[in-house]
Amino acid sequence: MNIFQINVLLIFLYAIFFKFVWISEKSEIWLNRIIASQLFFILGFRYQFVGTDTSNYFETYNNIVNFGFGDIVHNSYQDKGYVFIQWVISRFQVDFQFFLTILAFFNIVILAFVIEKYSQNVFLSWILFLSLDFYGFYFNGIRQALAMTLLFLSFHFLYEKKIKTSLLIYFFAVTIHFTAIIFGIIFILYKIQINFNNIFVLLLSLITMYFFRIDIAEIFVNSFKEGRYLDEISGSVGNVGTTFLIICICIFINLYTNPPWKGENQLNKLYTCILVVAAIVQSLSAISYIFTRLNHYFFVFIIICFPYILSNINGRKLKFPESQWKILYKLLSLLLIIICVVYYIPKIEPENSNNGILPYYFMWERS
């Protein structure tokens, strides 16, 4: 067994213990924090060259170590926020190996905080985080992963109606990885009153984007193809993939069981906005891989959004007796977890893993 298979096995054992052996009001909290600690340990104490792009990040960090304060602004790197973070941390004589540890700690702590606060099923949230390959992405797309984490914080403050703080964190995320600017559309949609007409317009936009996705994607890519973040058009204009289907299923279930225009639930409103935008961006993914990368900023919210939708199926349109609903909810949750794990395990076999995280080494194994 490799480290990631052992990781999944241990997470299952933790879940069994806290759900069937030690049951208390704080079981979910302890389960969340233990899983987070383990994921941090694997991510944060990996050898510095585990991951596809870490060698490039290594070179960048060693260049920035020698910067003066004025060089933070006057340099060839576009993402000044990331340069600033590296420069500040390097002032404490931290090498790249421990720089990765610091970033991993920040990322996982924020994720654990968001899951603990917003998830209706901690175990399912972490399984989704693993199986949909967000955890693997945190090994490779270091800058974008950090921007994604910051957007979770921005989401939190937006929900708490602390708009200025939310915007400040959002703009900082943009300086970490410029593509995070796409998340700004959520602030616009959040200000729009949720009603049936507006939801209809959003869904109509989604359908229109789907049918004209080739033309729209070509215009977008051709306009910005000289930029460092955009890929050329791939030429694959067929299936938009499983991700698009998952998002659309979530939208349908949420709109049918708990229509956001029939309540004042701001969390439901936020999730609906994020899912619709995620579907629109993902519909362009068959044209260029860049749209899949852009959609990470929205699709990652599935780890808290999907458990929310699942737990609220028994809403206005569907009404099961409470005893039946508890059994059905547990069966649905178990089925989803099994599907996720079955989908994930083959991707972390050494012969099938192409994302640079296998073979895996801890930092002390290569020192």
Image (cartoon, helix red, strand yellow):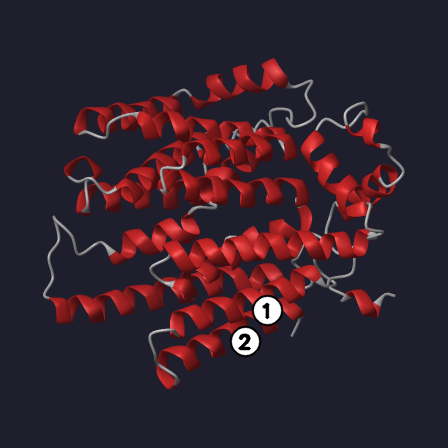
Q: What residue type is labelled 1?
A: Gln
Q: Is residue 291 visible?
A: no
Give the quadrant of the C terminus: bottom right
Image marks 2 and 1: residues in contact by CB distance under 8 Å: yes
- SS label for mark 1: helix
Tell me residue 37's x, y (percent).
58, 67
Pointer 1: what residue?
Answer: 38
Instruction: Relative to 115, say whether 214 is above or below.
Output: above
Q: Residue at x 35, y 68 (%)?
A: 334
Instruction: Relative to 93, say whether 262 is above or below.
Output: above
Mark 2 crowdedness (10 Å alpha carbons): few <14, some 14-19, many ≥20: some
Q: Residue furthest bottom?
A: 21
Give the quadrant of the N terminus: bottom right
Instruction: Relative to 9, say whether 108 is above or below.
Output: above
Q: How far apart are marks 2 and 1 (CA)?
A: 9 Å
Pointer 2: what residue?
Answer: 10
- SS label for mark 2: helix
- Out of 210 and 294, give the one closest to the viewer: 294
Tell me residue 5's x, y (percent).
59, 70
Q: What residue type is labelled 2?
A: Leu
- Out of 322 and 265, give the one closest to the viewer: 265
